[in-house]
Amino acid sequence: MTATKGKIGVLIEEHFDATEYKWFNEYFPAHGYEVEYLSHLWGQPQLTFGSNPENDVIEYHAVVTTEVNDVSPSDYKGIIAIGAYAMDRLRYQVKVKKGGKNTAPGVEFLRKAMATEGVKLGTICHSLWLFCADPDLLKGRKVTCAHNIVCDVENAGADVVIENDETVDLVIDGNLITGKHPGMIEEFVQVFVAQLDAA
């Protein structure tokens, strides 16, 4: 087996962005990084998630065998939350307590990842929704995102970078790299790899 520079863990659920999925699977391995998809598997050995439908067709399916509860953020050089509605699903918690912290496994993993030195984190488009589940994760951080969720991200305490009445394409704030939407996926993956290589 060819040695790699390390692994990139991608958090995923149903209704993920197909463009990002395609680019992650092609670009990262071509630049020396193994891609491993992570999710909460609800006690199953594996689950299959579909991409957002295009013209009523689900083009991509991801078979996930890695339970997010069973891995550590330090196992990865980088962690990315895939875009579209997948991250809203991943923040679902079975039981809620008034005023309590979100206990969804994906959110718990993200808390650990944000506190793990040396791990780069990436989001595109709607995937900052997962971070919004705990405002402590975004407070004071400079980010960009899809226009649809600017209000959610700002309410979670982030500083959304806006120029000429639009969110900017890409923002790097320390270990957090955020992209506006899949239209700038090429720039995102290039910058993400450059950040990993420089670490």
Image (cartoon, rainbow, N blue to C red):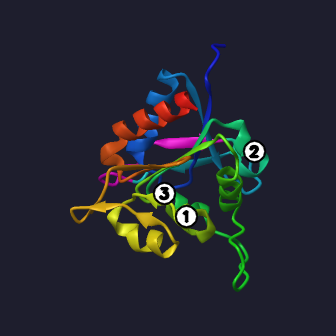
Q: Quadrant of residue 133?
A: bottom right
Residue drawn 62% across the image and 68% down it? 136
Give the extent of the magenta segment.
53-64
- Mark number, residue 127: 3
Can the viewer see residue 88? no
Tell me where residue 85 appears, x and y as whole percent. 47, 60
Q: Quadrant of residue 60?
A: top left
Answer above or below: position of 1 versus 59: above
Instruction: Please tell me which of labels 3 and 2 falls first in the chain.
Output: 2
Q: Main secondary structure of the magenta part?
A: loop
Give the secondary structure at mark 3.
Answer: loop
**Three-letter amino acid code at the position of disc 1:** Leu
Give 142 or 50, whichever is nearer the viewer: 142
**Three-letter amino acid code at the position of disc 3:** Ser
**Three-letter amino acid code at the position of disc 2:** Ser
- In front of the other: label 2 or label 1? 1
Q: Quadrant of residue 27?
A: top left
Residue drawn 36% across the image and 54% down it? 180
